[in-house]
């Protein structure tokens, strides 16, 4: 699988004011963690990260280049300002040699379901699954072909192919997608106050009133 590479630079311990000054200059503070790696404080170039951020998922390995040495890592957490949503800090987990990964992999539905072509509505039940695998076997995403899915039918995890070397941790009976038909809305017409007997005629209430009037005159 293709890795994204990002250059990082060493970061010495700074005061809050020093960190804010660095952020204003376009740098993002980050921390590298690992079972066999001493926690390391670094800076990322903000624009470099923004350029690739939209392509990064939890299951994508990022090569962090620190002074020429590459550290394969998974992005663990991004901290943002509450109001501006600007990135203020990122945590990375270093992938150690021989380590098995336990991560979530995105599911991408491919094709137009047969049931949708017939007027049904597609419901995408889950958007990611949990897997365990070696780093070299980690898929960035799983594409699921739904073109044959019919109305009133569901696609389960047991129905799709999982890449070799990848152990599925999410239950096989989990529904990925389902096609449902929309219920037709029944619109009731409001009851009319009176129905004309014919064009230019009188309503039943008017006829009753006229009959009572004639009886009184007699």
Image (tube, grey):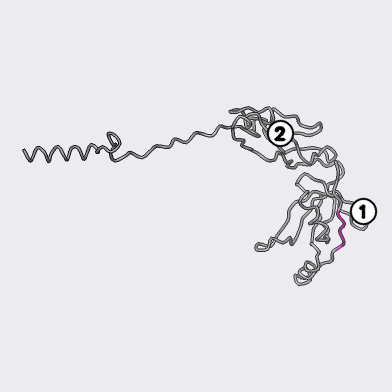
Picture coordinates of residue 58 (x, y %)?
A: 75, 46
At 84% from the left and 55% from the top, the residue drawn is: 38
How much space separates mark 2 and mark 1, taking CA atoms?
A: 42 Å
Residue located 44% across and 35% down the image = 186
> Which of the 4 quarters of the picture holds residue 169?
top right
Quarter containing the N terminus? top right
User: Which of the labelled discs sits on residue 69, or is there none?
Assistant: 1
Q: Secondary structure at mark 1?
A: strand
Q: Which residues are magenta?
A: 6-10
Quadrant of image for the C terminus: top left
Taking 65 as reference, is 185 above or below it? above
Q: Is residue 68 magenta?
A: no
- Mark 2 highlights which residue? 111
How would you rate the neighbour count of disc 2 (Cα within 10 Å): few for under 14, some for 14-19, many for 20 or more?
A: few
Q: Residue furthest right?
A: 68
- Label 1 crowd bin: few (<14), some (14–19), many (20+), radius 10 Å: few
Residue 78 vertical placement versus 166 (above, below): below
Question: In the depicted view, which residue is nearer to us: 76 or 153?
Answer: 153
Predominant SS of the magenta segment: strand
């Amino acid at each position: 699988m293709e890795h994204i590479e990002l250059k990082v630079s060493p970061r010495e311990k700074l005061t809050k004011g020093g960190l804010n000054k660095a952020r204003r200059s376009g740098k993002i503070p980050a921390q590298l963690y690992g079972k066999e790696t001493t926690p390391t404080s670094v800076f990322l170039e903000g624009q470099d990260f923004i350029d690739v951020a939209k392509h990064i998922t939890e299951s994508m390995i990022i090569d962090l280049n620190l002074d020429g040495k590459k550290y394969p890592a998974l992005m663990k957490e991004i901290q943002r300002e509450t109001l501006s949503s600007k990135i203020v800090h990122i945590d990375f987990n270093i992938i150690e040699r021989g380590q098995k990964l336990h991560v979530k992999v995105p599911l991408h539905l491919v094709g137009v379901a047969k049931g949708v072509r017939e007027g049904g509505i597609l419901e995408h039940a889950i958007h990611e699954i949990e897997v365990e695998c070696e780093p070299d076997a980690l898929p960035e995403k799983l594409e699921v072909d739904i073109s044959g899915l019919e109305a009133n039918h569901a696609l389960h995890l047991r129905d799709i192919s999982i890449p070799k070397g990848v152990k599925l941790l999410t239950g096989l009976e989990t529904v990925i997608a389902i096609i449902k038909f929309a219920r037709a809305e029944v619109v009731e017409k409001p009851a009319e106050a009176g129905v004309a007997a014919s064009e230019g005629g009188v309503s039943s209430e008017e006829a009753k009133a006229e009959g009572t009037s004639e009886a009184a005159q007699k």
